[in-house]
Image (cartoon, grey):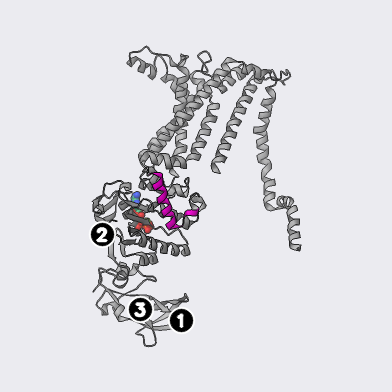
């Protein structure tokens, strides 16, 4: 059990400053999810916590211990890679107990831990197989098993589910939530997937170009995004962002409204023409070319609509988000 | 029922059908050139050599003086032949047990892609690019007892200069050294390519698990480049069996025939003395050894892939 503190971290590759100055606190036992666009430095941050990359400046401590210059294996962490990074020439069992064998853990103890991990992850029938003979989901479970047996204080995951298909991803997501529930260890998790971020996280960290935009609970980010970037990044389909006169009237440079907070109806203030409607069964997503620009509207249930049809709509005032010219939220 | 019958019928026709299919036609079309080339340039010369080895023949006219296995008997009773076999085995052992580990060690030091490493790789690879004859000449200057670097070294140690290549005890050692120098870069490059193809995450994962540098090498890198090590060893063995062009400019098999390899033996006692039948017999023996090695290698790799 350990919290992770990053203080004034800077990471510079050659002449490129990937992370200028970052401070982040990951509470003990939390499930913290890092999200952000590709290349914003999520993996780099995770690798610095792991010790695979050294920060150019700043301090990293885990469980109150300064580990900035510590070997990866002495930090009490374990990491699951996107590519799983299983050793292809070893069996599942050898993959899982590789670290224990290196540290000369007694056979009995090793066996006990492997069995426990295999039990949790349903790996018993696969222990004698090589990774090549496993499915993607099974490989991912082995990679997680390898990280469990070392009893780390902190688990690091770098997009662990992104190589899996949608159904398997859902299943593994639930299993990861269970795992966190059971082990109660600190977990830091990098993902591109909105659903993973919203459902797994106690705390989401939104990053952009090496900086932290906002840290908070999922619903807090969803309901009160502090910056324009977070407003546009969290939520799918994305929040509608409107500039110009309509925003100026409300004393803002930009106003944001989520697709589910636009109401269609005969009494609407604004007009638009339906470009495309996507029927998902439980909801309908309408793309509208309106006088305010292109807007996305989400309607519950299946609504019959015709392309080219003129629609009237209005915003639910209490759900409007206002942002100033620097992209900061106006309270 | 009729379905099953038709399936059975089509099966019995399947070989013919295969040949008539477009794939079969492609095979019929592509096979003859390759088969012809193989026959002309591999199979026929081999059979020729095997045939000539049964004659006492100087290479002029048609062989008529049939002597059965007498050439083989002569070869196997010749002390210098056995000396050359011993020398070949020494080169082979040095290649496998000194050169390959050395090449692997160097490859581990320079396989990562940095500008400095690129330079090192080039430098280490240079001896291999150099023509064999040229390397032989260069080293014969180095080993020269009057003016060479080696003699300067001996002098600076206060010893009498030694004509290394003219010394029965030292000459073959010197040749072995040149072979080592010349070919380690080749093996290093094979290992470099293989090491670069090992995913970096595997090394990082091993490090996270607490593996020290040498443990990463021992438990991850070496097992994962096993196939390349096999190829390298195969080349080393075949190369040793065929070693020739480094020896000729250095010692030409001397002093007193102590530094022959199997091929320089064949060349000296078969070709230059126009005893083609005798030389062919040596060639056949060498060929059998090479085939033996190939079969052993194939066995090993097939077993490994299972
Ligand atoms: N070893 C390196 N050398 C130079 N630049 C690097 C190195 N590693 C990462 N970078 C740069 O740092 C930036 C952040 O990379 P990083 O891998 O952390 O992004 P990311 O947020 O994980 O992106 P993704 O979501 O695509 O995985 C990128 O611009 C990348 O090019
Ligand atoms: Mg990444």
Q: Which residues lie in the magenta part?
A: A106-125
Q: Residues within 10 Å of mark 1 (few under 14, many from 20)?
A: some
Q: Quadrant of residue B71?
A: top right
Instruction: Identify the residue shown where x is 57% and y is 18%.
Output: B82
> What residue is pinned by disc 1?
A303
Alpha carbons under labels 2 and 3: distance apart: 33 Å
- Looking at the rendered structure, the secondary structure element under dot 1 is loop
Please, which chain is the residue tagged with disc 3 on? A
The reply to whether the C-beta atoms of the residues labelled 1 and 3 are less than 8 Å apart is no
**Would residue A239 be seen by someone viewing this image from the given angle?**
yes
Extreme residue in the front direction? A108
- Looking at the rendered structure, the secondary structure element under dot 3 is helix
- Looking at the rendered structure, the secondary structure element under dot 2 is strand
Above or below, B112 against A161 in this view is above
> What residue is pinned by disc 3?
A261
Q: Give the mark nearer the N terminus: 2 vs 3.
A: 2
Q: Is residue A120 in the magenta section?
A: yes
Q: Give the mark nearer the N terminus: 1 vs 3.
A: 3
Q: Give the image quadrant in which the ligand numbered 2 is located.
A: bottom left
Above or below, A148 against B293 in this view is below
> What residue is pinned by disc 2?
A25
Secondary structure mainly formed by the magenta segment: helix
Disc ID at residue B253: none
The reply to whether the C-beta atoms of the residues labelled 2 and 3 are less than 8 Å apart is no
Above or below, A189 against A299 in this view is above
Between B189 and A57, the one nearer to me in the picture: A57
Instruction: Indicate yes or no: mark 2 CB to ligand 1 under 8 Å.
Output: no
- Where residue B252 appears, as percent x and y from the top left, is 52, 18
Query: Taking B75 as reference, is B228 left or right?
Result: left
Please, which chain is the residue tagged with disc 2 on? A
**Would residue A190 be seen by someone viewing this image from the given angle?**
no
Quadrant where the image shows the C terminus of chain A: bottom left
């Amino acid at each position: 059990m350990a919290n992770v503190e990053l203080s004034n971290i800077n990471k510079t590759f050659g002449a490129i400053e990937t992370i200028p100055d970052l401070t982040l606190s990951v509470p003990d036992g939390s499930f913290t999810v890092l999200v952000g666009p590709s290349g914003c430095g999520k993996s780099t941050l995770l690798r610095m916590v792991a010790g695979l990359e050294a920060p150019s400046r700043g301090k990293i401590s885990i469980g109150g211990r300064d580990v900035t210059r510590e070997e990866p294996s002495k930090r009490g962490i374990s990491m699951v890679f996107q590519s799983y990074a299983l050793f292809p020439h070893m069996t599942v069992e050898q993959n899982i107990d590789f670290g224990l064998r290196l540290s000369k853990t007694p056979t009995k103890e090793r066996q006990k831990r492997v069995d426990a991990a295999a039990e949790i992850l349903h790996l018993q029938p696969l222990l004698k197989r090589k990774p090549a003979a496993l499915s993607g989901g099974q490989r991912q479970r082995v990679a997680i098993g390898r990280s469990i047996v070392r009893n780390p204080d902190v688990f690091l995951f770098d997009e662990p589910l992104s190589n899996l298909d949608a159904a398997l991803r859902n299943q593994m997501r639930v299993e990861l939530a269970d795992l966190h529930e059971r082990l109660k260890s600190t977990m830091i998790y990098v993902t591109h997937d909105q659903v993973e971020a919203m459902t797994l996280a106690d705390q989401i960290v939104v990053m952009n170009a090496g900086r932290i935009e906002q840290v908070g609970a999922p619903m807090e980010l969803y309901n009160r995004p502090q910056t324009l970037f977070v407003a546009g990044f969290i939520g799918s389909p994305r929040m509608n962002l409107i500039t110009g006169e309509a925003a100026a009237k409300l004393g803002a440079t930009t106003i944001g409204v989520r697709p589910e907070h636009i109401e269609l109806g005969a009494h609407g203030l604004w007009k638009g023409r339906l470009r495309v409607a996507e029927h998902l069964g439980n909801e309908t997503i309408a793309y509208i070319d309106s006088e305010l620009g292109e807007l996305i509207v989400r309607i519950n249930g299946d609504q019959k609509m015709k392309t080219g049809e003129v629609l009237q709509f209005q915003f639910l005032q209490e759900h409007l988000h206002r942002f100033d010219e620097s992209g900061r939220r106006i309270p | 029922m009729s379905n099953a019958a038709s399936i059975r019928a089509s099966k019995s026709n399947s070989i013919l059908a295969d040949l008539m299919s477009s794939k079969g036609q492609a095979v019929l079309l592509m096979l003859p050139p390759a088969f012809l080339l193989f026959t002309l340039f591999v199979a026929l010369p081999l059979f020729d050599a095997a045939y000539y080895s049964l004659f006492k023949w100087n290479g002029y006219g048609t062989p008529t003086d049939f002597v059965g296995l007498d050439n083989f008997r002569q070869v196997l009773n010749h002390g210098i032949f056995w000396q050359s076999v011993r020398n070949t085995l020494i080169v082979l052992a040095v290649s496998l047990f000194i050169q390959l580990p050395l090449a692997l060690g160097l490859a581990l030091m320079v396989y990562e892609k940095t500008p400095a490493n690129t330079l090192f790789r080039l430098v280490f690879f240079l001896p291999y690019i150099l023509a064999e004859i040229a390397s032989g000449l260069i080293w014969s200057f180095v080993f020269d007892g009057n003016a060479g670097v080696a003699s300067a070294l001996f002098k600076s140690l206060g010893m009498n200069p030694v004509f290394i290549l003219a010394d029965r005890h030292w000459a073959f050692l010197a040749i072995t050294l040149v072979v080592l120098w010349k070919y380690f870069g080749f093996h290093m490059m094979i290992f470099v390519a293989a090491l670069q193809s090992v995913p970096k995450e595997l090394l990082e994962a091993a490090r996270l698990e607490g593996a020290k540098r040498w443990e990463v090498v021992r438990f991850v890198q070496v097992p994962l480049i096993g196939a390349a090590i096999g190829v390298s060893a195969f080349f080393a063995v075949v190369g040793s069996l065929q070693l020739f062009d480094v020896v000729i400019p250095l010692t030409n098999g001397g002093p007193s025939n102590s530094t022959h390899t199997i091929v320089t033996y064949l060349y000296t006692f078969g070709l230059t003395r126009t005893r083609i039948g005798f030389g062919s017999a040596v060639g056949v023996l060498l060929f059998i050894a090479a085939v033996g090695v190939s079969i052993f290698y194939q066995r090993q790799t097939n077993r490994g892939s299972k």
